[in-house]
Amino acid sequence: MALFPLCKRLAGSARVLRKQLALYCLLLFLLIYFLKGRRTAVKIDKPPIFRSLGLDLSVEARAVTEETVKEKRQRLHQETWWGAPLVWGDSSISVWRRDEFGQRRVHTGLLTLAVGGYAGFLPRFLSSAELHFLPGATVTYYILTDSPRTLEPLPLLAPRRNLKIVPVAELVGWKHLALRRMALLASAIKDPIRNEVEYVFCADVDQEFVAPVGAEILGELVATLHPELYGMPRHAFPYEREPDSSAFVEDGEGDYYYTSELYGGLCPEVYTMARACSQLILQDQERGVQIAGLEESYLNRYFINRRPTCVLSPEYSWWESALAADVPAKRLVSLGRQCESLEPQKREQHGC
Ligand code: UDP
Ligand code: MN
């Protein structure tokens, strides 16, 4: 009995303790909730994809656009709206296209420019192309270079693979060659390439084939989607906005943004394209019009006027970057652009 009052007191203080505990829990819960909310808000506030593109969208619009971009990037479209195939190497359509071309003996040229220090990329470019570019097909490599000696002794090639060196005397430097490259390609296609092969592909030399690139890429006029801009809204595309430039693209024009790392097709088509682009470049040069994106801008202008009949997915032009779209397979990797887009500490790891 004497214990009763004590028990009562204990029970009373336990209730107070329980209340205090509940209050602390509530406060803790609110604190965690608040901090988590803030972290999410910060995340939404700075999606890298938009920050890098300098897009200034409202929070609501950004949420919607971000979702759409994600969705668009995940969906593997098989066709463009004008009916050209959009090529993913492992799709059943690609398997079918490889079979179709496998029935025919197609001769394809792979054309690249290697002037100055870029000749150093040739061994890796060629050995990887031997493994993965149109394996088993008849291929001639056309190397436009000012230093043919870099390739001596000539690499051993598989049966039905040839290599031709086309000497060029060009000033080195990216800026100069960006203005000259289309003219050089056009002249090489005119003579000798178009007399020797049916299809020709132009590729930057600072690339490596890392998985098969088969006959699914063959088409009349072939362009490749830029991996950082695949699925992005059109207003994010870095089209030329200088109205005086021959590469100028008006708001509302354009379908995709293409990379200049790889394009090709039937020789007459690629010749017409390279010649047209070189003329536009020359025209701007003569009028003193300076443009931002150089060769890629003219290429994109051309593909608006003359839509490609075959569009390669970013599997065929990929590089590691915060903006690059996820792809089921990486087939051709631009080592040069990868080095440019990597953070300094990652560069060494990738051999930059
Ligand atoms: N190139 C070259 N020598 C140079 C600069 C460029 O041979 O001094 C050729 C080379 O094939 C290179 C292409 O032009 O891959 C385009 O240059 P780069 O890859 O630097 O340009 P980006 O990929 O940034 O357009
Ligand atoms: Mn390049």
Image: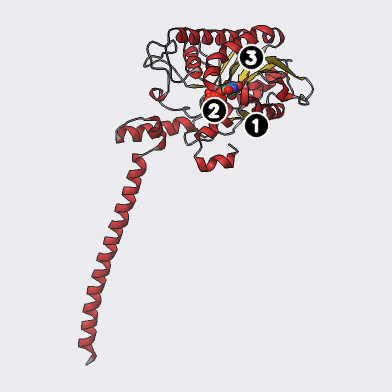
Q: Nearer the viewer, mark 1 or mark 3?
A: 3
Viewer-proximal residue, 69 or 170?
A: 170
* Amino acid on which disc 2 is placed: Pro
Q: In the rendered image, is residue 260 in sight?
A: no
* Amino acid on which disc 1 is placed: Ala
Q: How many C-alpha atoms fall within 10 Å of the one at disc 1: few (<14), some, or many (≥20)?
A: some
Viewer-proximal residue, 196 or 327?
A: 196
The residue located at (32%, 49%) in the rendering is 37
> Where residue 80 appears, x then y in whole percent?
50, 19
Viewer-proximal residue, 30 or 352?
A: 352
Figure check: 67 above or below 281: below
Would residue 152 be found to the left or right of residue 314 on screen? Answer: right
Mark 1 or mark 2, which has the lower sequence index?
1
Q: How is the image coloured?
A: secondary structure
Q: How many C-alpha atoms fall within 10 Å of the one at disc 2: few (<14), some, or many (≥20)?
A: many
Marks 1 and 3, how far apart in space? 33 Å
Would residue 4 be found to the left or right of residue 280 on screen? Answer: left
Label 2: which secondary element: helix
> Where residue 350 appears, x then y in whole percent?
58, 39
What residue is shown with label 1?
A: 211
Disc marking residue 314: 2
Disc marking residue 169: 3
Figure check: 57 above or below 35: above
The residue located at (69%, 14%) in the rendering is 166
Mark 1 or mark 3, which has the lower sequence index?
3
Disc 3, ligand 1: is the CB inside 8 Å? no
